[in-house]
Image (cartoon, rainbow, N blue to C red):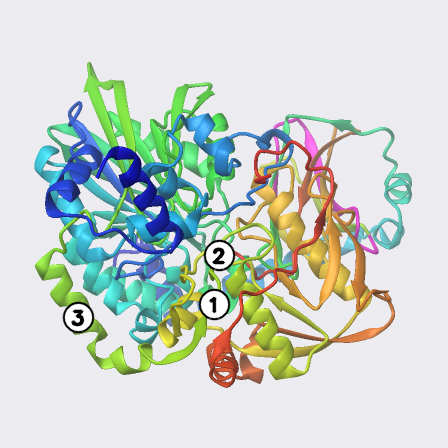
Amino acid sequence: MNRREFLHLLSAASAAGLALPLDPARAEQAAEALYDAPAFGNVSLLHITDCHAQLRPIYFREPNVNIGVGAMANRPPHLVGEAFLKHFGVPPATRLAHAFTFLDFERYAALYGRVGGFAHLASLVKRLRATRPGALLLDGGDTWQGSGAAMWTQGQDMVDAAKLLGVDVMTLHWECTYGQERVKEIADKDFAGHVDIVAQNIKTTDFGDLVFKPYVMRAVNGVKVAVIGQAFPYTPIANPRYMVADWTFGIQEDNMQKTVDAARGEGARVVVVLSHNGMDVDLKMASRVRGIDAILGGHTHDGIPSPSIVENGGGKTLVTNAGSNGKFVGVLDFDVKDGHVADFRYRLLPVFSNLLPADAEMAALIARTRAPFESKLGEKLAVSEGLLYRRGNFNGSFDQLILDALIAEKDAEIAFSPGFRWGTTIMPGEPITMENVLDQTAITYPHVTLTPMKGSQIKQILEDVCDNLFNADPYYQQGGDMVRVGGMSYSCDPTATMGNRIGDMTLDAKPIDAEKTYKVAGWAPVSEAARDAGGEPIWDLVARHLRSKKTIAAPTLNLPKLKNVEGNTGIAS
Amino acid sequence: MNLEHPASRRGFLRQTGLLGLAVSAATFLPRMAYAAWNKAAFDAKTIADVYKTMGVEAPTASAEVQLIASDIAENGAVVPVEAISKIPNTTQISFLVEKNPTMLTAQFDLGPDMLPEVSTRLKMAQTSNVIALVKADGKFYTATKEIKVTLGGCGG
């Protein structure tokens, strides 16, 4: 077979959605090219974030809409597709291009296989630690939530997996949705002597006392390294406040500066922030707080191959973001000389599960943890004809499926589904299992609601959520995506101000009447009243809908008509 | 018992009932100020009217006044705010919420030996500018910050 024939076969095979078997020699070659990153300097930090309890390998499609507005337009992380590849110099149609972008997703996912999985991640961490003795493993949070098994064990499966993986330091967001007592229990018992939870911005509501250590100091090859924690600042707003009733959060920029100064005062030669701010917030914070060498960020699920370098009054700060769902490991190598960071190297390594052997001990732990839930998780509810994914500013095909299910099952006119950024991807022709449904819905406040709402209220909700996404000042953003909307059409101008972004609201081609009442279905209410009222968990409703359908055609996405976004690199053409 | 440790300090206060006392002490303050209650100012419906009834003319935005509050309120019903004045001879600090039906929400008269640092909790129904208004030597100075009140949910 000559080269042309081989390429022809390759494209035919991938067009048909067939994964080409990778022989061991070629797999090892590809793994070496990716993972044998030469060590550099004397202080190495390994960074994982936002794995959302995905213990096993999954597919995850990156977004084709991730718009930045104002000063955030057209700069990382607000680049998608070709613009992303061009900006970071990633060659198109390669394994790396597939890891970082949505381009030709079905074709390349079939070719390169699943990503992540803690057994494969564990092998990679061991491989990296072998060349980087003393390296710290930092976990940016959103680790204990996002799967059925994590929910049913109150995060215990992930706590055990993180300990076995050898996480040194972590910070928090979705962890808090198991309630403050559960978080403290894990911090004080399971994690004692193993993992430090750090957060300079979680304090008690009564006296303003710190709930966790603001930072920890670790010696890496004789160099003192401070790791400061920054939990998600808007946890009591984006998630139910009653779950963290005695804690207050916020960005706490002044206290961050004091904490950095305290760490330097204690002799830290390297100061990093393990952050769950989201990348835009991290970039702003880096421009205002002095003395941070790097902010290792998460929350916004941006897989960014090289750091943004931000200048501030104290020098320069690197800002990174390490994606989500166990798909990446960030490797930051510092060369520390004469008491300060002299140089660095950074890599964001995709975890391709067919290039990395499964670590036996981790695989055994995962199998043991899942055993009680296997039959429930494995139930095949329906077969998907199209690609099902979530990520994107306005809608995803799995969200559309949830919206369709809500409208059908609740006999609603309009449906809302939260703009979460977690949730895995299902390939066309695959069965949709209960596990897949839970990967999109497993939260501790899952109730379905059916609410009579006036047109004016609907507009207010859309404006409110849209401002959380597109406020020109990142400190006023919350980092989720736009609420997904079913049944109703609308337009959105991300560049407008609060109250002026949403327009052209119509239902069945008729304008939404501000005074008329509509039946609106939704889920994930954050109020205590909604918790007490109860209601069916969303996964039961979606599962019921899927069982009755058996086959799910590729959903048609209900997307708003966008205004004033011509030329924005956050939208793929 | 080591009262330096936050948890044991809280436990001690709880045991002795001092926690309740500490909380109720805060409620004495407005009553103590009752003698000087400027009813017209607290009833005023516009910023201009508040200023008029307080005798404020063209207040100056000043970097010497610090307004400390979160960017987004965790709970609009109780929004903690703190104002610190570094202006000499500060005798009064007030908080105004632009979009509240009555804007003047708190006023602190300070004696000569008191530090010009006050904190309180505001109630806000919607996103609004909050103003800390400082009186010193008969002149007025301000610091302004937008505090966002949001419906919540949908994050992450």
Would you say A469 lies left or right of A159 here? right
Per the model, the C-alpha gap separating discs 2 and 3 is 32 Å
Residue A55 screen position, x and y as percent: 26, 61
Q: Which residue is mark 2?
A: A235
Q: Which mark is residue A350?
A: none
* Amino acid type indicated by mark 2: Thr
- Name the quarter where the C terminus of chain A is drawn: top right
Query: In terms of secondary structure, where does tag 1 sit?
Result: loop
Q: Nearer the viewer, residue A146 or A90?
A: A90
Q: Which residue is mark 3?
A: A367
Range drawn in magenta: B82-102
* Amino acid type indicated by mark 1: Glu
Badge 2: how crowded within 10 Å, few (<14), some, or many (20+)?
many
Query: In terms of secondary structure, where does tag 2 sit?
Result: helix
Q: Which badge, 2 or 3, is on the more N-terminal residue? A: 2
Q: Nearer the viewer, residue A155 or A347?
A: A347
Q: Is residue A423 above or below residue A181?
A: above
Per the model, the C-alpha gap separating discs 3 and 1 is 29 Å
Residue A499 screen position, x and y as percent: 77, 50
Residue A122 screen position, x and y as percent: 16, 51
Q: Which badge, 3 or 1, is on the more N-terminal residue? A: 3
Question: Magenta segment: does it hold B59?
Answer: no
Q: Is residue A124 above or below residue B79?
A: above
Q: Is residue A192 above or below residue B51?
A: below
Q: Nearer the viewer, residue A318 or A248?
A: A318
Per the model, the C-alpha gap separating discs 2 and 1 is 36 Å
**Count of numbered marks:** 3
